[in-house]
Amino acid sequence: MKRLTAILAGACAALLCAVMALVLSRPATAAGLVQVTDFGDNPGNLQMYVYRPDQAPAAPAIVLAMHPCGGSGPGFYSSSEFASLADRYGFIVIFPSASKKMNCFDNWSDASKVRGGRTDPVSLMSMVTYVERQYHGDPDRVFVTGSSSGAMMTNAMAALYPEVFKAGAAFMGVPFTCFPNEGSYNPGGNSAPCVNKSAQQWGDVVRQANPSYQGPWPRMQLWHGTADTVVSYAELAEEVKQWTNVHGLSTTPTSTDTPQSGWTRQRFADSSGAVQVEAISVSGAGHSLPMSGMAAAAIHFFGLDSGGPTPPTSPTPPPGDSACWISYTANTWNNGFTGNVTITDHGTSPINGWTVTWTWPGNQQITGMWNATITQSGAQVTARNVSFNATIAPGAQVSFGFQGTYSGTNTAPAGFALNGGACTIVT
């Protein structure tokens, strides 16, 4: 486990989870995120945070969203898109914080592999039950998602409590029961730790967790970057084996497509044509999922993006419109903050490679970033695309974010430029 901690710490420093680790050490003071301290049985010693949008319906759906190693609930809230999607579609999000080594969810102990085991899954189920009771969450629309360690726990929750979760979306995970013990929980030190079972064997460990359960089983969406060196891309095929076997499907996809540039999606449908499992490979991506737009794809897979109380609206630009639209939002606490910048190509030609610049009106200093390479000299900031988001098609958007510090007032920049040209700020 010490090797895992060191490896994941190094990976976090270079990739997305580094930003998450920084963000998540902060208290949850952003409006709308509420910490619940007494939510029921908590053998995993987890912390619970809830995001309920202002316009949630009377019986909202519930999404359990879990961070990677080195992260926390408030950080995943700030660095992922699930809260903004909850605003749009009216579901509640639970953002738990893990407490084990390097803030990883327990995916290795014997207790984590059995229903009712005295560790993290029981604590997570207490959170779901609390939201059903206190927030009138709809027990027939409960979903689970997570990144890395959170993705591993996504597979575990779907396996251990299949009658609770209708669907799951696992970003950079491994099959349920992959790790036999804590000492083996070392994905970064083993190029492919869980590739030694057949589809039948992987399916059997799920069925054995609930011997009397006959279905239906949760639908599963599985994501992985092809260049992931922390949790091997080879694990995606093992997850596919597990969940297709649980659903009684072949490991040969019924269809393959490219829903977005760089994404290769394999879908596994049953005899009625309903997709029960889908696997999405992200070309060239490392240990950095979910990226921009992927949370929305998960919510679509869950079926939560239709009939919501606040359908998406187009940004409203001020007079003097330009071909580049930029929106900026910040979550501020004490002397720290996170910022999110969304670029919209409002022109008629694609943007091939982008550089966004702005000047801070105060003493803001960026300390971490995701989905962009950011440099700062004095008050001047330059953000450049990374390999996977260099192109923005007409009408499409790209988002990036950062963490920073400040003193005094955290005032937003007065303007942004894209590739040297002024952009229209939208709200």
Image (cartoon, rainbow, N blue to C red):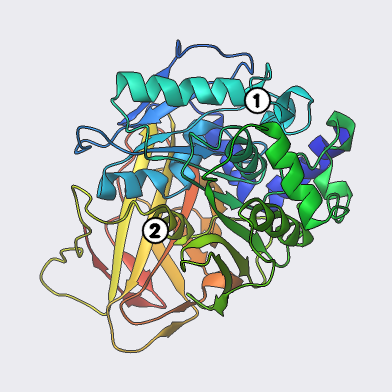
Residue 99, image x, y percentages: 65, 23
**Seen in the image, is 161 located left or right of residue 351?**
right
Considering the numbered disc 2 on the image, is that residue within a helix, a strand or a loop?
Answer: helix
Question: Visible in this render: residue 156?
Answer: yes
Q: Residue at x 46, y 53 (%)?
A: 401
What residue did someone put label 1 on?
115
Q: Which of the two residues, 366 or 363, is positioned nearer the viewer here?
A: 366
Mark with earlier residue (1, 2): 1
* Image quadrant occupied by the N terminus: top right
Task: Examine the image and state in which quarter residue 198 appears.
Answer: bottom right
| Residue 365 in view (yes/no) | no
Q: Amino acid at mark 2?
A: His
Q: Which of the pair 55/323 is nearer the observer? A: 55
Is the C-beta separation of discs 1 and 2 under 8 Å?
A: no
Q: Position of residue 363 (x, y in %)?
A: 42, 43
* Tag 1 secondary structure: loop
Hey, which residue is sitting farthest left in the picture?
A: 319
Residue 397: x and y in percent read 37, 69
Q: Amino acid at mark 1?
A: Arg
Q: Is residue 90 left or right of residue 97?
A: left
Determine which residue is flagged by label 2.
300
Locate the C terminus by quadrant.
bottom left
Relative image position of residue 53 (x, y in whole percent): 26, 37
Q: Is residue 348 above or below residue 47?
A: below
For the point 26% across and 56% down, the residue is: 306
Q: Is residue 333 above or below residue 45?
A: below
